[in-house]
């Protein structure tokens, strides 16, 4: 109840390799600006931080200070496993007019985050991109964009690092993954699986969460809908999973939350095995 609010709370991201810290995005009151976005009717979203104690209780979220948060929208983030580098979505605003969204990178110095720098991806000047996902070796960024060359709506693209803060030309993940709808909120698991949300594949309603991976030739496989209870008839998106694959978090607008989008935790239940049989004598066949 401390993490979620009556407003939109979404896009959780692990803050360290021990999974004891989390960053997420929220439009709750108490951010850097009280201005209201005319499109959503809520405050401009900011990035918040929370941590979990040994009793499994999350702390009251704290808004991340400037310069990570600004007077505009801050969206989805992803951190490296050491928690020292953050890729974040920033949507600049001037005179309450949106100037589009781009991906920035900030590096932490002690407890403070440095000035975010624009990630140098080769894009048209009017292209909007966001929702960064980072591979474990930090060499590949996957993101969502409606740039030219896609299959309609927002598609998933990837880019690879070339040199200091410079990235290759984006590559579309292709028509097996992308549809005429929207593909968004990717997450790159350590085992190579990509989890993402889509309203273009056949699903249960709204945005659903899917997973895909590459075959031995590097081609992406048909996305698999994760079905109930991960997905619902409402929007479900922004799934992140610990390295073990046994626990993770997602965002959902399903009934039962505090309001708007909420962050949920899920765990893979332990297997309960029972063995039943008959013991016989191998020579006589007697029981």
Image (tube, helix red, strand yellow):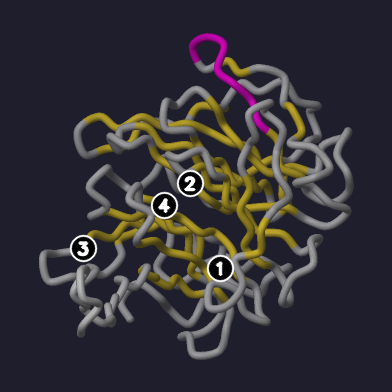
Pick out the residue farthest to the top.
163
Q: Are marks 2 and 1 in contact (CB under 8 Å)?
A: no
Label 3, secondary structure: give it. loop
Find disc 1 in the rendering and name its residue: 43
Q: x, y (%) of residue 239?
A: 51, 59
Q: Residue at x 33, y 51 (%)?
A: 244
Pick out the residue farthest to the front.
284
Question: Gap between marks 4 and 1, in whole Å?
Answer: 21 Å
Q: x, y (%) of residue 141?
A: 57, 31
Label 1, secondary structure: give it. loop
Q: Are marks 3 and 2 in contact (CB under 8 Å)?
A: no
Q: x, y (%) of residue 16?
A: 28, 44
Magenta residues, start to end: 158-164
Mark 4 or mark 3: which comes first in sequence?
Answer: 4
Task: Residue 135: give its label.
Answer: none
Q: Residue at x 41, y 37 (%)?
A: 86
Crowd rating for badge 3 (residues with CA inside 10 Å; few <14, some 14–19, many 20+): some
Find disc 4 in the rendering and name its residue: 13
């Amino acid at each position: 109840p401390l993490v979620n609010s009556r407003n939109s709370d979404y896009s959780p991201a692990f803050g360290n390799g021990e999974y004891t810290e989390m960053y997420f995005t929220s439009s709750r009151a108490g951010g850097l600006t009280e201005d209201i976005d005319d499109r959503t009717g809520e405050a401009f979203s900011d990035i918040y931080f929370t941590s979990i104690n040994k009793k499994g209780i999350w702390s009251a979220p704290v808004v991340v200070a400037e310069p990570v948060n600004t007077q505009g929208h801050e969206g989805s983030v992803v951190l490296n496993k050491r928690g020292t580098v953050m890729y974040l979505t920033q949507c600049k605003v001037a005179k309450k007019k949106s100037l589009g969204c781009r991906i920035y990178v900030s590096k932490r110095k002690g407890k403070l985050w440095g000035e975010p720098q624009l990630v140098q991806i080769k894009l048209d000047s009017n292209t909007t991109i966001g929702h960064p996902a980072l591979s474990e070796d930090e060499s590949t960024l996957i993101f969502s964009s409606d740039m030219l060359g896609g299959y309609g709506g927002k598609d998933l693209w990837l880019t690879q690092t070339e040199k200091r803060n410079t990235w290759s030309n984006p590559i579309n993940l292709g028509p097996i993954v992308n549809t005429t709808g929207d593909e968004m909120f990717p997450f790159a698991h350590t085992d190579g699986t990509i989890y993402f949300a889509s309203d273009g594949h056949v699903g249960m309603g709204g945005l659903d969460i899917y997973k895909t991976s590459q075959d031995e030739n590097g081609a992406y496989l048909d996305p698999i809908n994760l079905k109930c209870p991960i997905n619902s008839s409402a929007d479900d998106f922004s799934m992140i999973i610990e390295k073990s694959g046994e626990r993770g978090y997602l965002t959902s607008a399903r009934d039962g939350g505090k309001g708007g989008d909420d962050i949920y935790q899920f765990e893979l239940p332990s297997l309960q095995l029972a063995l039943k049989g008959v013991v016989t004598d191998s020579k006589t066949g007697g029981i």
